[in-house]
Amino acid sequence: MLFAAVVLSYIDRLVLGVLKPQLETLYGWTNSGYGDITGYFQVCYGLGMLGFGWLIDRIGPKLGYMLAMGSWTIGHFAQTLVTSTSGFVIARIPLALGEAGTFPSALAAVSQWFPKQERALAIGIFNAGANVGAIVTPLLVSFLVAGLLLDWRWAFILTGVFNLVWLGVWWRFYRKPSDHATITTEERAWIEAEPQEDVGRAGFRRVLGHRQTWAYMAGRFLIDPVWWTFLFWLPDFFSTQYGYDLKSFGPPLVAIYILADVGAIAGGWYSSHLLKRGMATGRARKQAMLICALFALPVMFAVQASDIWIAVAFIGLACAAHQGFSTNLYSIPGDLFPRYAQGTLIGLGGFAGATGGFIASKSLGALLDKVGSYEPFFIACGMAYLLALLATHILNPRYAKVAMSQPA
């Protein structure tokens, strides 16, 4: 269910990016205008992460996901009512606010259902839904708009219907392990093998008082902009760099996100494998992140590729590296913080990542209008992961578990 929800969230946020070259021609959009759409989406997403992170700690993942997907479905359908870049900025506000609840809700559900030694792999599996959504979207949109010759609005309408089905299934079937009717005694014992923290609450100020929080936020600030920009701008990159259009850039995008899918699961598997061999948690996570950071370096040469498939190989490797890196970075809340503080931390990390994404998107839109080259962006992408690992290690060298005492 978590995997399916992430797939749907990425389909809904990426439909516009796939349609961008067509809408740009139809309505005279500029790169700066499209940068406004993606940039302000990330601002609202970041604010939503703060709210949902706090909220999930209080209402839990079941109601949290209902609220999140309900909101983003409204915003998804609302995009059929506008044509200008400013109109899309406004219509996508509930989409951004709702989608901000995706990962806080999913990570809270994983924390409920999986012990530490399985958590990174579980995160990797649902995080792989991002890549499946990215694979499905260009194929589905091109089939609907270029194949069936439907109006572009139908791409939003038909994909939104899937959300309504998911909401019904989630409401009917999701339960906590302690409330689940068919869970076995052995499975419940395995899930609950870790010592349980006292029930409590943690606000932003208390969570921000720990170095581990700033390590997580720094990592998200540096790597999230890479992923966001790939999601929203790769169709435009293939269109401007290689002349691909809605009918033809589907296969390159599919290849990239298949590689990303492999990276998501492999990154989670690798650190979980090291943990089962007895390696310390912090060392296992950081070793996995270092390997991923090295795999991201070749993307710096993507713009210089003479053939689109060479560029696809560089970008796909970077996307795989990103997903493997982020899978281990996303493990910090579950590894180091009590459960009642994890949603708040996830929200702060999402806000930091969205802030970096806003800066990157606005800068890239202006850069393309003035210079017309993606090269500076790809160079920054290649270096981002080593910088993120360095910042995370400096701020959290011992990967120490947070002792968060209750306020008097």
Image (spheres, rainbow, N blue to C red):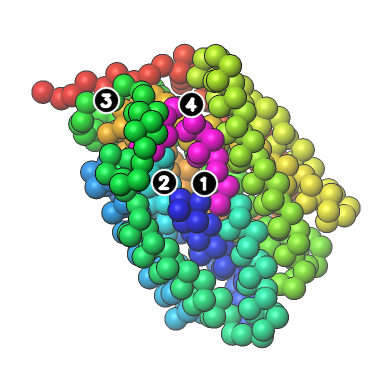
Q: Nearer the viewer, mark 3 or mark 4?
A: 4
Dot 2 falls on a residue whose secondary structure is helix
Q: Earlier in the sequence, mark 4 or mark 2?
A: 2
Instruction: Write the start and end of the magenta stretch as one range.
Output: 112-130
The circle on residue 154 is: none
Q: Amino acid at mark 4?
A: Gln
Q: CA distance from mark 3 to mark 2?
A: 20 Å
Q: Nearer the viewer, residue 80 or 142?
A: 142
Give yes or no for residue 313 being in the magenta stretch. no
**Pointer 2 residue:** 106
**Is 73 left or right of 363, judged from the image as shown?**
left
Instruction: Tell me the residue that label 1 is attached to.
Output: 126
- Mark 2 to mark 1 CA distance (whole Å): 8 Å
Residue 136 position, x and y percent, is 63, 63
Using the image, determine if residue 12 lies above or below residue 381.
below
Query: Mark 2: few, some, or many residues within 10 Å (few <14, many ≥20)?
Result: many
